[in-house]
Amino acid sequence: MSDGVRRPVADGSRTRAFVRRSCLDVLDLGDLEPVDSHAIWHAFAHRCERPTLLVARPRSAYVSLGYHRHREELDWGEIQARRVPVVRRRVGGGPVWLDQRQRFFQVILPRDHVVAAVRGPKFAAWILERVARSWRRLGLETVLDGHGEISCQGRKVCGHGSGEIAASLVVVGNLLEAFDPEAAAGILSLSRIAREEAVAAMRRHVGPSRALVVDPEDFVASLVQELAEILGDPRPGILELDQDLIARYRSLVDEDNDGWVRGAPNSARRSVKIRAGVWLHDLEHEGRRCVLLVEEGRLTRLRHEEGSAVTDPALLRRRIERDRSLAMLLASVGASLGDEDDRTYRRGGVDDVTRLPRL
């Protein structure tokens, strides 16, 4: 019987069919300053000659914003109050809160090591399945779920992004040993009620149910063991990088930099991806703020400013049927009330896999 878990690659013969094995360079970078935790792997992607695994942890908290997302999605007053830097990343989507209770991994391969048919989402899923297996070696009940995210007991415990940088394929992510929903929602530019709803939704869906204690050496060893099976025999990597290139990526921390601003061509969104399949929309309805929580394409929670939340399916249906403007608002985000003949929720954009221009 199927357990609903997507398993892209289960045997070595299929691995050999689409990836060229060589060796796996492994670099445990330890604790890094926030900007360096991004700059180093970006620089590696521009100089990658062999499959490489980087592992690190940030020394302090910071905010990471995807290349195609807008700076106005951030609450800059809150960011300044928390005294955290903001870094652009060249894969992934919206703003995320990162801190020292997260362990980072970055897997980088030369693009010509992987056949074209499995680049993109298939490649990301293939790597993430191995990451999930590695964490099971640590005693965690992690699986690659039907949405392509690593979850533990139904809760998202890994944020990830993937894409192409220069001539490399990259999959980056983190193990959430603990998660701070107040901080994660606090740095977003949302209305008061949307922020409250975002915190509540994150508490239900994101982070382990209780804080994890993971030995850092075991974390690296388990990743190496799983990834070496598909990428090649592990060996110590060498941290030899073009310092000018690292300096260019370090400049991404400066929100006043022209290149930083030009990296955000799209208009600001008021939609928050809580986790795959769960979206919160902060909208205006008849002069009031209105928050829609959509799970698996279905409206599950509706709240207006100065009003109480509605979660009962029958009440939600009556509200939508009686208010044409509210029905149009629901349609504008591609959601439904859950009927089989309603449109399935789809969210476009660049939130999961992005191909980006060269620097």
Image: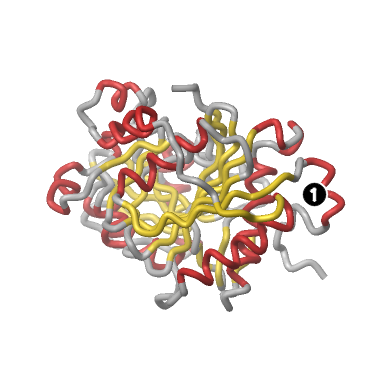
How would you rate the neighbour count of disc 1 (Cα within 10 Å): few for under 14, some for 14-19, many for 20 or more?
A: some
Q: Is residue 205 left or right of residue 198?
A: right
User: Residue at position x 16%, y 54% from top?
Assistant: 82
The one of 172 and 345 positioned closer to us in this rendering: 172
Q: Secondary structure at mark 1?
A: helix
Q: Quadrant of the C terminus?
A: top left
User: Residue at position x 65%, y 66% from top?
Assistant: 133
Residue 329 against residue 131 in the figure, above or below:
above
| One can see residue 71 in this view | yes
**Amino acid type shown at disc 1:** Thr
| One can see residue 298 in this view | no
Residue 242: horizontal and vertical position, in percent?
41, 31
User: Residue at position x 87%, y 52% from top?
Assistant: 13
Residue 64 against residue 313 in the figure, above or below:
above
Q: Which residue is mark 1?
A: 15
Residue 192: horizontal and vertical position, in percent?
22, 52
Residue 98: horizontal and vertical position, in percent?
34, 54
Residue 23: horizontal and vertical position, in percent?
68, 48
Which quadrant of the structure image shows residue 243?
A: top left
